[in-house]
Image (spheres, rainbow, N blue to C red):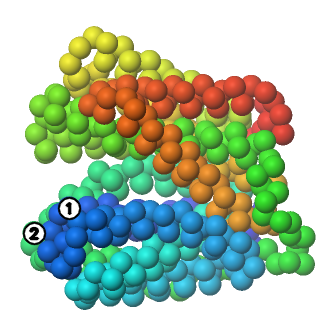
Amino acid sequence: MPAKNPVWGHCLPSALLLMAPFDILASLAMDIYLPIVPIMPAALGTSASVVQLTLSLYMVMLGVGQIIFGPLSDRVGRRPILIGGAVVFLFASLGLAASSNAVIFLALRFLQAAGASACLVATFATVRDVYAERPEGAIIYSLFSAMLAFVPALGPVAGALIADHFGWRAIFVTLGLLMTGALVHAAWRWPETRQTPQELARRPAITVLGSYAFWTYTAGFGTAMGSFFVFFSTAPRVLIDRAGYSPLAFSLAFATAALAMMVATRFVPGRVERWGRLGCLRRAMVTILAGAGLLAAGEIMGAPSWWSFLAPMWVIAVGIVLVGGIAANGALEGFDDIAGAAVALYFCVQSLMVGIGGTLVVLVLPGDTAWPLVAYAAGMASLVLLLAGAKRGGLVEADA
C-alpha cells in the first residue's frame, strides 16, 4: 500500500468533512437558484433571456474555469487556489444578495462560478495528491458522486423553502454563510499537498490527452454522470406528466435513486481491492447496461411505474457508484506532476460528454419516456466496454 502523504494527517471522516462542502456548494449554487428564476426578471428589471444567461454562464464558467485553475494549482499550490476560490465565491454570493442590477448580477454570477470552479479543482487535486493509490480514494470519489446526486434532488426544494420564508436574497446569503463555514474550516486545517518542483519534473498538460487510459476511464465517468443527468432531465416528465405523481411524491421517488447510490457506496472499497480498477470499470458498465435493458423492457410494457422506471434506475445507480469510485484514479494515474491540470481536463472532458451527449438524446428522443436514458446509458456503456476490452495504454487486468 502506498505511503500516506506526510502533510495530511486527517482520518477519512475528518477529510470528508473538510472536502465535501466545497464539492456540494459548487453544485448547490446552481440548483438552489432554480425555483426563483421565474421571478428574477421582475426583481432585476430585465428580460427572461438575461436571467437564463445567469444559469448558462454559471455552467460554462464552472467547466472552463477548471482549465484555468488546474494548471495554476500545479504552479502555486492547492491551498491558495482553494482559499482564493472560496473567498471569491463568498463575496460574490453576498454581492448577489444585495444586487438589484441585471448587469452587476450577471457579473457576480460569473465570479461565483469562478470561485466554485477553483474550489472543485483544488479539492479533487488534493484527493489525487493524498489518496492516489489508496483505498480511501475510492471511498471519497464514490461518496462525492453519491452526495452530488442529492443536490439536484434537494437543492431546488431548499431554495423554494428559503425564498418563500425569507425572500430570494436569502438564498444567496445562505450560500455565503455555508461557504464561510467551509472557508474557516479549510483555512485552519487544510495543508498544502502539492509536490514541489524538486520532487517531480513537470510535463505539458496536453500530454494527458494522449493517454488511452485517460479517455477510457473518463468515458466511464461520463457514462455514469450522463446517465444521472438524463434521468434528472426526463424524470419529471415521465413521473409527473405520464405517471401522474404529485410534486411531493415525485421528490420522494427521485430521492430513492440517490439513496441507492448512498447504500452502494458502502460496498465499493472491497470491490476495488478484489476486482481491480479495470474489473470494476467493466462490471460497472455491465450493470448500467442491465439497468438500461430493464428500462427498455418497462417502456415497451406500457405506462411508467415505480418498478418499470425507478427500480431500473437503482440498478444503474449501483453502476454509477462503482465507476465513480475508480474512474478518477484510473484516468489520472501517471500524472502526479501535473495533477491539477489533469483533474481539470478530466472534469472538462466528461462535462462535454455529458452536456453534448445527454442533451442530444433528450432533444432527439421523446423526453417523456425512458428512451433517452436507455439510449445514453446503453450507448456509452457499450463504448466503454469496447475501449476497456482493447487492453491498450496500460489497461490491464491487474490495474488496481
Is label 1 in a helix, a strand or a loop?
Answer: helix
**Could you tell me if residue 55 is visible in this image?**
yes
Q: Given the image, on which type of amino acid does mark 2 rest?
A: Asp
Marks 1 and 2 in Cβ contact (< 8 Å):
no
Between residue 249 and residue 43, name the one nearer to us. Answer: 43
Q: Given the image, on which type of amino acid does mark 1 rest?
A: Pro
Q: Give the residue displayed 54% in from the left and 83% down from the top.
A: 83
Q: Which residue has dot 2 on it?
A: 164
- Sequence order check, earlier mark of 1 and 2: 1
Between residue 15 and residue 371, name the one nearer to us. Answer: 371
Q: Residue 43 at x, y = what percent?
A: 16, 78
**Residue 35 image label:** 1
Crowd around label 2: few <14 · some 14–19 · many ≥20 (10 Å)? few
Crowd around label 1: few <14 · some 14–19 · many ≥20 (10 Å)? some
Is label 2 in a helix, a strand or a loop?
Answer: helix
Label 1 or label 2, whichever lies nearer to me, is 1
Position of residue 284 relative to residue 109, above or below, is above
Between residue 161 and residue 97, name the one nearer to us. Answer: 97
**Residue 388 image label:** none
* Horizontal side, residue 358 vs residue 120: left or right: left
Q: Residue 208 at x, y = what percent?
A: 77, 55
Q: Give the residue displayed 53% in from the left and 48% down from the top.
A: 142
Q: Assign the C terminus to one quadrant of the image.
A: top right
Position of residue 142 relative to residue 52, above or below, is above
Q: In which quarter of the image is residue 291?
A: top left
**Could you tell me if residue 263 is visible in this image?**
no
Q: Give the residue displayed 38% in from the left and 37% down from the top.
A: 363
